[in-house]
Amino acid sequence: MNVPNQARSSLSILVLHGPNLNLLGLREPGIYGSVTLAEIDQLLQQEASSLSCQVVTLQSNHEGVLVDAIQAARTQHQGILINAGAYTHTSVALRDALAAVALPVVEVHLSNIYQREPFRHHSFIAPVAVGQISGFGVESYRLGLLALVHTLKTGARAN
Ligand code: CA2
């Protein structure tokens, strides 16, 4: 886990990246772009600084590791920003963990999952998230963090 600017703020966000996202910038740049995951994490750290909050990032290819991180977040973080990768479309376990911790969740995707294959159109996470941002590349993460921090600071929800 990457934990800079820790002492700066009491608001802490857990950022979770799911399977294969460690390959970003290294494979298939035509679909997911040329930015690496380390660069995305760096961008989020900078954005967090300007929002006076802290982000802790974790990537895992293992569903159970992500479930453990979500469960642990209950006592360590105030919100979760998640790109669950392919687990978005398959994982009841991640959805149950997110529902159980009851922290505000924002779901993000680099690609527009609704313009892609039909099996990517369903998200198990969307029903337990405050909202979803999909299709803006790296901007999806930045916008997602902004939306999550706004939700936490104002309590704003659309419904
Ligand atoms: O668009 C997204 O952010 C996705 O969550 C990415 C997932 C995909 O399964 C979701 O449907 C949408 C895939 C991440 C795989 O990332 C790679 C990066 C480089 C090379 C290969 C895979």
Image: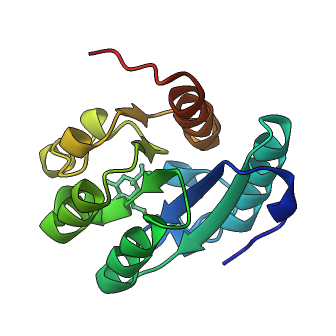
Q: Quadrant of the N terminus?
A: bottom right
Residue 139 or 54: which is nearer the viewer? 54
- Ligand 1 resides in the quarter of the picture at bottom left
Name the side, left or right, on which 25 lies relative to 39. left
Report x, y in % for residue 37: 66, 64
Residue 136 visible to an observer of this rendering: yes
117 displayed left or right of 64: left
Q: Residue at x 85, y 61 (%)?
A: 7
Residue 35 appears in view: no
Instruction: Indicate the quadrant where residue 84 lies.
Output: bottom left
The residue nearer to you, when weighing 36 against 30, is 36
Query: Could you tell me residue 136's position as x and y percent?
Result: 54, 33
- Relative to 131, residue 3 above or below: below
Q: How many marks?
A: 0
> Is residue 57 shown above or below 49?
below
Q: Residue at x 49, y 45 (%)?
A: 110
Residue 49: percent from left, percent from top: 84, 44
| Residue at the extreme top of the image, as rendered | 158
- Residue 81: horizontal and vertical position, in percent? 49, 50
Residue drawn at (36%, 72%) of the image: 71
How is the rendered protein coloured?
Answer: rainbow
Work out whether residue 91 or residue 56 is closer to the camera in this orientation and state it.
56
Q: Residue at x 78, y 53 (%)?
A: 45
In this image, 52 relative to 109: left or right? right
The C terminus sits in image quarter: top left
